[in-house]
Image (spheres, grey):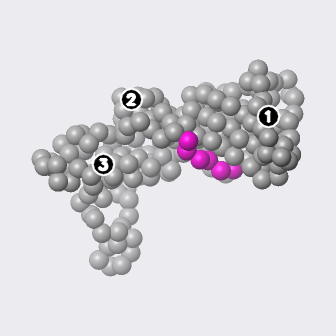
Amino acid sequence: MTAIILVAPASEPVSLSEAKTHLRVDTVDEDILIQSLLTAARLHAETISGRVMITQTWRIALDHWPARNILELPIGPVQSVDAIRIFDDDDITMTIDPSRYLVDVGSVPARIAMRGHENWPDPARVLNGIEIDVTAGYGNAASNVPEALRHSVLMLAAHWFENREPLMATGGQLPVPPAVTALIAPFQTARI
């Protein structure tokens, strides 16, 4: 299963001005660095938690359907499943009618299944023969994102701002502060 971002979030969950206030930076000299640290910190929190913050669109590619016929989506929180397509041997797509499947966005992770215990149609293409487009995120505004996730982004960006070297003086990697990990932990989805 591969997840590919199609439409990135329009903004970050923590604004540049919020970060500059937290860092007590009054000049514009560090704006580009701070903005890039905010993006990197968001990506880190999203990767660790399995949840995206600000609304974005993703494509999930699969080789085949799961044996149980219920697919758990690796991106969340899912707002909508926008399209499900399968490919034939000539790379021509067939879009599955949304009335034929159920979407459960209330579960964590979100799930999709065919209605009436019907089997999913098999793709003819062996590799990435299934594409599922989803819209995910807590909403379009930073105020929609849980405060703990927003704060983890702010703290991690501040940590990286203050510690610009990737390695410690002893040669080991600079660890993510435990407080950041603790803020993200409640949002992590169980992985088997």
Looking at the rendered structure, the kind of residue marked 2 is Ala
Percent x, y for residue 108?
Answer: 60, 35
> Nearer the N terminus, badge 1 or badge 2?
1
* Residue at the (30%, 58%) spot, across then down: 160
Instruction: Check whether the beta carbons of the residues at disc 1 and disc 3 lie within 8 A of each other.
Output: no
Decide whether residue 4 is among the magenta residues: yes
- Which region shows up in magenta? 1-6
Gap between marks 3 and 2, in whole Å? Answer: 17 Å
Instruction: Check whether the beta carbons of the residues at disc 3 and disc 2 lie within 8 A of each other.
Output: no
* Residue at the (32%, 40%) spot, across then down: 14
> Nearer the N terminus, badge 1 or badge 3?
3
What residue does disc 2 label? 141
Instruction: Check whether the beta carbons of the residues at disc 1 and disc 2 lie within 8 A of each other.
Output: no
Q: For mark 2, does the 10 Å Cα neighbourhood hold few (<14), some (14 to 19), or many (20 or more) residues? A: some
* Residue at the (68%, 31%) spot, across then down: 83
Q: Which mark is residue 138?
A: none
Looking at the rendered structure, the kind of residue marked 1 is Met
Q: Nearer the viewer, mark 1 or mark 2?
A: 1
Decide whether residue 150 is among the magenta residues: no
Q: Nearer the viewer, mark 1 or mark 3?
A: 1
Q: Decide: is 84 above or below 1.
A: above
Q: Which mark is residue 94?
A: 1
Percent x, y for residue 64?
Answer: 80, 46
Q: Which mark is residue 35?
A: 3
Task: Examine the image and state in which quarter residue 98 appears.
Answer: top right
Judged from this view, the residue extending furthest toward the bottom is: 170
> Nearer the N terminus, badge 3 or badge 2?
3
